[in-house]
């Protein structure tokens, strides 16, 4: 980067920082926002944590679309990077230390992901965080040279990828059969349905992020 | 007394965040830039905790710092492999 462009970048960023600072300073002192509206309706959400209630119940549609966006991102990456037998990145054989750490960390990370998923109902946590931890475990496995077996890389992998979105859409559609609106969970089932969606979403987010890290479509047994 | 310590901590967080952001953008070495970006994400997670948003902090640490960093590093590795191939050809 030459001097002129770096000065220009600094000026633009400084102006942006001043504008943001101005906006923050002139925020209303006591903004009501939607916090009271959310806490009034918490009894109808099926969970005890307001963030999870908003993400999975009150604004469930947004989360559904987020899951679809994640899936679309992977489809985009896969269509740009053709399936190839050659490894795009050659990873040196994993050291014994890394492999030992891998064996220790994988069960712990799966446990943490499960905990984050479960705790999301009444404290900070939830599907995206749990899925990210699961994906981190997957990335560690890829770095240790582990690869999906050919027979798992075909439809079982694709099933894992779409499971979260499919479960979300299935629940959204199923409640409509009972006469409710899209994603309007019956009160007595809300907690269970949210956990079901989140569990499926966690798994899919984990697999999707891991596949994004891998970059190319994994090699399958079947010839296309 | 506690407030002033917390204020000093906040001030340190903000200045570290701004410095890391500036270094990540300005450094000519891409690898160094990615490492600085990961550090930036971790400090940003601390900032979210200080703003009483532990949910966002968790997401930032796991996705923003961890996975985005890993994705950027593989991208860099692939870019490196491609440019080396070009040099050979």
Image: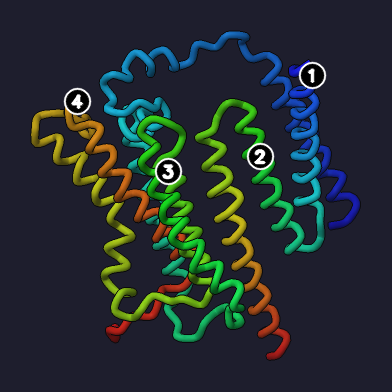
The answer for which chain carries disc 3 is A
Secondary structure at badge 4 equals: helix
Residue B14 screen position, x and y as percent: 76, 33
Contact? badges 3 and 2 (CB < 8 Å): no
Give the CA distance from mark 2 to mark 4: 37 Å
- In this figure, which residue is indicated by the disc labeled 2? B44
Q: Name the residue located 39 percent from the left edge and 75 percent from the top edge.
A: A148
The residue under the point 69% across, 78% down is B83
Q: In this view, does B88 lie above or below B55?
A: below
Q: Element at badge 3? A: helix
Crowdedness near tag 1: few (<14), some (14–19) or many (≥20) residues, C-alpha within 10 Å: few
Q: Mark 1 points at which residue?
A: B4
Between label 1 and label 2, give the one nearer the viewer: 1
Scheme by which the image is coloured: rainbow
Along the viewing direction, whichever of A139 and A24 lies nearer the viewer: A139
Same chain for labels 1 and 2? Say yes or no.
Answer: yes
In the picture, the quarter occupied by the C terminus of chain B is bottom right
Q: Mark 4 = which residue?
A: A187
Q: In this view, does A72 lie above or below B16?
A: below
Whole-number angstrom distance, CA of label 3 to CA of label 4:
23 Å
Residue at the spot x=90%, y=52% of the render? Answer: A3
**B32 lies left or right of B47:** right
Real-space Cα distance between discs 3 and 2?
20 Å
* Residue drawn 73% across the image and 32% down it: A16
Q: Can residue A112 be seen in this view?
A: yes
């Amino acid at each position: 980067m030459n001097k002129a462009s770096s000065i220009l970048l600094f000026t633009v960023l400084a102006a942006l920082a001043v504008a943001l600072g101005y906006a923050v300073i002139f925020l209303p002192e006591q903004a009501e926002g939607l916090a009271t509206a959310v806490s009034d309706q918490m009894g109808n959400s099926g969970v005890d944590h307001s963030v999870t209630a908003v993400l999975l119940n009150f604004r469930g549609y947004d989360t559904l679309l987020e899951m679809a966006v994640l899936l679309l991102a992977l489809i985009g990456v896969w269509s740009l990077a053709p399936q190839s037998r050659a490894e795009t990145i050659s990873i040196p054989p994993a050291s014994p230390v890394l492999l030992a750490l891998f064996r220790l960390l994988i069960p712990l990370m799966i446990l943490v992901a499960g905990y984050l998923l479960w705790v999301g109902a009444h404290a900070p946590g939830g599907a995206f965080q749990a899925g990210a931890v699961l994906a981190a475990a997957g990335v560690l496995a890829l770095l240790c040279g582990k690869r999906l077996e050919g027979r798992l890389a075909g439809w079982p992998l694709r099933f894992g990828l779409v499971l979260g979105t499919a479960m979300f859409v299935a629940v959204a559609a199923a409640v409509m059969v009972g006469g409710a609106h899209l994603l309007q969970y019956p009160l007595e089932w809300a907690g269970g349905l949210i956990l079901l969606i989140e569990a499926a979403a966690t798994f899919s987010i984990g697999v999707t992020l891991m596949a994004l890290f891998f970059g190319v479509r994994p090699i399958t047994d079947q010839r296309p | 007394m506690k407030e002033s310590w917390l204020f000093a901590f906040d001030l340190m967080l903000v200045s570290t965040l701004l410095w890391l952001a500036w270094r990540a953008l300005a450094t000519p070495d891409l690898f160094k830039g990615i490492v600085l970006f990961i550090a930036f994400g971790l400090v940003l997670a601390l900032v979210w905790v200080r703003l009483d948003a532990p949910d966002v902090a968790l997401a930032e640490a796991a996705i923003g710092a961890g996975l985005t960093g890993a994705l950027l590093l593989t991208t860099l590795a692939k870019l490196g492999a491609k440019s080396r191939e070009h040099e050979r050809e």
